[in-house]
Image: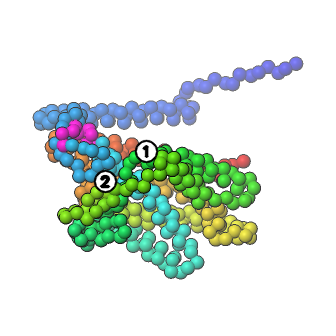
Amino acid sequence: MSTPRIAPPKKKWSWRSQAFRALVYQVVAVAVIALLVLYLANNTATNMRARGIQSGFDFLGGAAGFDIGESLFAFDSGEPYWRAYLVGMTNTLRVAVLGIVLTTILGTLIGVGRFSRNALVRGLCLCYVEFFRNMPVLLQLLMWYLFFTEVLPVSTEAWQLGPLFLSKGGLNFPIPVWVTGQVMAAWGLLAGLVAAWFYRGYAQARFEATGLPRSTVLAPLALALACGVAGWILGGAPTALDRPIQGEFAIENGGSLTPEFMALMLGLTVYTAAFVAEVVRAGIQSVSLGQSEAASALGLNRGQTMRLVMLPQALRVIIPPMTNQFLNLTKNSSLAVAIGYPDVVSIANTAINQTGRAVECIAIIMLVYLSTSLFTSVLMNWYNARAAITER
C-alpha cells in the first residue's frame, strides 16, 4: 500500500517571510532609484528650457563639420555626428583591445619573473613594478608623447631599421597588398584559431586524464599559423607589399602608427602591466609550496611546474583582480584627449563645442564606457567560471 504523497506547503506572502521582505526591499529600492532618475531628468530639461538651451539627440544626424586625424575607416567632415562618434568609439576599442592583450603578456612575464632564480631578473622586474606603478598614468602618457614628438627626428631624417621608419610622424611599416590570397590567409588564420581553441581544450583534458603534458601554447600557435599559411598558399601565395619610402617631406606609402596612438598604447600598457604583474605574483604565491615540490618530485622542470601546475591553480585568484585592471585600462584610455588622440572623449568634446549639447554628449560617453566595461566583465566572469575548481 503506497503512502499518500504530501503536497509541499504553499508559500505564504507575509512580512514574517524573509524572502517576501527581501523582494519588497528590492522593489522599493528600484522604485526610489527610478523616481530619482526621472526627477533629475525632468529638472534638467526644465532648467535647460528656461535658459533657452536646446536638448535632444537630433544633432547626431547633422553634419559634423570637422575632420578626424586618425580613423580605421574613411571619414569626411560632411558626414553626420553619429559617424564621428563611431570613429571615436572604434579608436577607443582599438586601444582597449590591443592594450589588454599586450598588458596581459607583459604583466604575466614580469610577474613570473619575480620568481626567477636569477637575482638580476628578479631585481629588474621589481624595479619595473615599483617605478611604473608609482607614477601617475597621465604623466607617463605625456612622457611617451614627448619622446615621440621631441626626441625622435623629423620625417626627412627618420630612423630606418630595415623596412621600418621611425620619426616624429610615427612608425611606418610595410603592409600586404590586399588581394585574394590575403583574404584566404585571413580566413585560414581564423579557422586556425578556432582549431587551436579546441586543441587546447583537448590537450588539457588529456593531461588531466593521463598526466602526460601536451603543449598548450606552442602547438596551438603552430596550428593557427599553419592554417593561415595554407589559406595564403591556396589563394596564390601573393608576396606583394606596399612598402614605405622616404619622400621629400614625409614618409610615403605603407602603413603607419601615429605618435599619439603609440604614446597612448605604450603608456597604458607599461602602467597597467605593473599592476598585472603584482596580481600574477600574488596569485602564484597563493598556491601551496607543496604543489611545486610535488611537481619537482614528478620530474617537471621549473618552466613546466610554473606553466602546468602553479599558474593553472593561481588563475582562480588572478582572474578577479585582473578584470579590474582591464577595466581600469579601458577607462584610462579617456586620458587620450590630453595627447590629441581622437578617442570618443575627444570627439564628444568637439561636438559639445559646436552644438552645445553637453548633457547628450556626456551621456554618450557614459554609455560607451559602461557598455565596454560590462562586456569585459561578462567575458572575464565567463572565463573565471571556466577556470574555477570544480568540486566533485
- Quarter where residue 13 is shown: top right
Where residue 46 appears, as percent x and y from the top left, is 19, 32
Q: Residue furthest bottom?
A: 119
> Is there any visible trace of residue 107 in the rendered image?
yes
> Where 386 sits versus 16, above or below?
below
In the image, the segment drawn in magenta is 77-85
Is 368 rendered above or below residue 146? above
Q: Does the magenta portion include 207?
A: no
Is residue 133 shown left or right of residue 45? right
Using residue 331 as the reference point, say whether residue 154 is left or right of it. left
Image quarter of residue 12: top right
Q: Give 321 or 339, whichever is nearer the viewer.
A: 339
Question: Which residue is tagged 1?
Answer: 180
What colour scheme was applied to this rendering of the protein?
Answer: rainbow
- Residue 375 drawn at (x, y percent): 44, 44
> How far across and down, in percent of the image, does residue 111 sit?
51, 67
| Looking at the image, residue 110 lies above or below residue 22 | below
Amino acid type of disc 2?
Answer: Ser
- Determine the residue positioned at 27% across, 69% down: 158
- The image's mark for residue 112 is none
Foreground residue among 340 and 115 = 340
> Are there few (<14), some (14-19), or many (20+) residues within 10 Å of tag 2?
some
Task: Mark 2 or mark 1: name the one nearer the start of the chain.
Answer: 1
Outermost residue on the front side: it is 236
Q: Is residue 294 left or right of residue 153?
A: right
Q: Residue at x 48, y 62 (%)?
A: 105
* Along the line of sight, the residue nearer the viewer: 26 or 139: 139
For the point 70% across and 56% down, which residue is it?
207
Per the rendering, the mark at residue 334 is 2
Classify mark 1: helix, strand or loop.
Answer: helix
